[in-house]
Amino acid sequence: MTGQRQKQNKYGIEYGWNSTVFTTVEHFWNQRGLTIPELDAEEGYELIRQQILKLNPAAEERIIRKFIRG
């Protein structure tokens, strides 16, 4: 999520409740002048796994796998 935006009709007049605005991770960071390095899936998996273990050394591998891969 990147925020909320007011709905507008075809004349540009705002109406109704705000809508949530979604974007991709790449677009979010690119707008802020940062890029995401290109990683293959296994390299990315291992980096996430290492961060999980850094925060929770007792994390079980099957739980880590489920968290990352869904």
Image: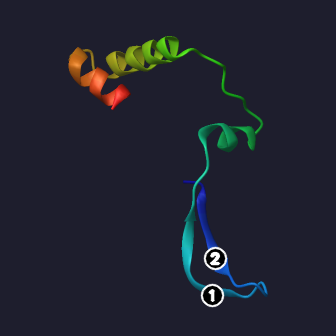
Residue 52 location in percent, x, y? 35, 21
Question: From the image, which quarter does the N terminus lie in?
Answer: bottom right
Q: Is residue 18 above or below residue 38?
A: below
Q: Note whether residue 11 is visible.
A: yes
- In the picture, measured across the screen, residue 13 lies left or right of residue 66, that is right
Residue 31 location in percent, x, y? 75, 44
Image quadrant of residue 63?
A: top left
Question: From the image, which quarter does the C terminus lie in?
Answer: top left
**Looking at the picture, which amino acid does disc 1 mark?**
Tyr
Q: Is residue 65 above or below residue 6?
A: above
Which residue is under mark 2? 6
Residue 49 location in percent, x, y? 38, 17
Secondary structure state at the residue bearing disc 1: strand
**Looking at the picture, which amino acid does disc 2 mark?**
Gln
Residue visible at 66% across and 20% down in the picture: 37
Q: Note whether residue 59 is visible.
A: no
Which residue is under mark 1? 15
